[in-house]
Image (tube, rainbow, N blue to C red):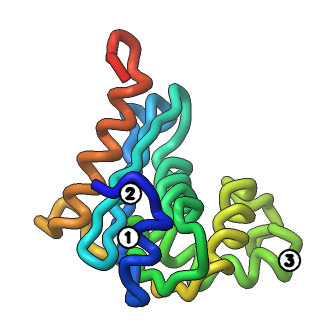
Amino acid sequence: MSDGMNEMNEASEGVVEIHTDGACKGNPGAGGWGALLRSGGKTRELFGGEAHTTNNRMELTAVIRALEALKRRCRVRLHTDSKYVQQGISEWIHAWKKRGWKTADKKPVKNEDLWRLLDEVAAQHDMEWLWVKGHAGHEGNEHADMLANRGVDSVKPGQVA
């Protein structure tokens, strides 16, 4: 595992492959997020959790934290099993912004704080957003799921972080 993204960024002028996932025990409940970053033969794992959150917030947080870990502009292929994230950032966000962060039925966009942050950090990179079927044996997704569950465990009562 690489200790720093500077090292990873310098290792390859190629693509950074990122796999992200979120998990929640109860929705809302204890939640975790995980991200697996790979570039130039180097790998980095990231995870964390929150005591009271939702699955969608953890899915978004995983992507945000992964992109924040990159220290310079990169070509990124981001793999997520969340259609909420993939469609939200690829399709829905444009209309939300035009409508002042309102949905088509004029309601506030849920998780607007995270969507705004994701929009900001994603703009710093050349992004390709890929949806993968969750829990279907996709190695990167399974690894990100394991990290997200580690994040849940880090905030559950009685667990050691």
Vertical position of residue 111 compared to residue 32: above or below: below
**C-alpha separation, residue under disc 1 versus residue under disc 3:** 30 Å
Q: Which of marks 1 and 3 is in front?
A: 1
Q: Quadrant of the C terminus?
A: top left
**C-alpha separation, residue under disc 1 versus residue under disc 2:** 7 Å
Q: Name the secondary structure under disc 1.
A: strand
- Please give the label number shown on residue 18: 1
Confirm whether residue 130 shows in the render.
no
Mark 1 Cα within 10 Å, few/some/many (few <14, many 20+)?
many
Q: Position of residue 101 (x, y in %)?
A: 81, 68
Look at label 1 and name its amino acid. Ile
Q: Which of marks 2 and 3 is in front?
A: 2
Q: Nearer the viewer, residue 39 or 63?
A: 39
Q: In this view, does 61 lie to the left or right of 38?
A: right
Q: Which residue is drawn at 53% across and 67% down?
A: 70
Q: Are marks 1 and 2 in contact (CB under 8 Å)?
A: yes
Q: In this view, does 53 lie to the left or right of 134?
A: right
Q: Which residue is drawn at 60% across and 75% down?
A: 72
Query: Which residue in the protein does label 3 denote?
Result: 99
Q: Position of residue 124 (x, y in %)?
A: 66, 78
Q: Name the secondary structure under disc 2.
A: strand
Look at label 2 and name its amino acid. Ala
Look at label 3 and name its amino acid. Arg
Query: Which residue in the protein does label 2 denote?
Result: 35
Q: Are marks 1 and 3 in contact (CB under 8 Å)?
A: no
Q: Position of residue 15 (x, y in %)?
A: 39, 85
Location of residue 159 by image quarter: top left
Q: In which quarter of the image is the N terminus?
A: bottom left
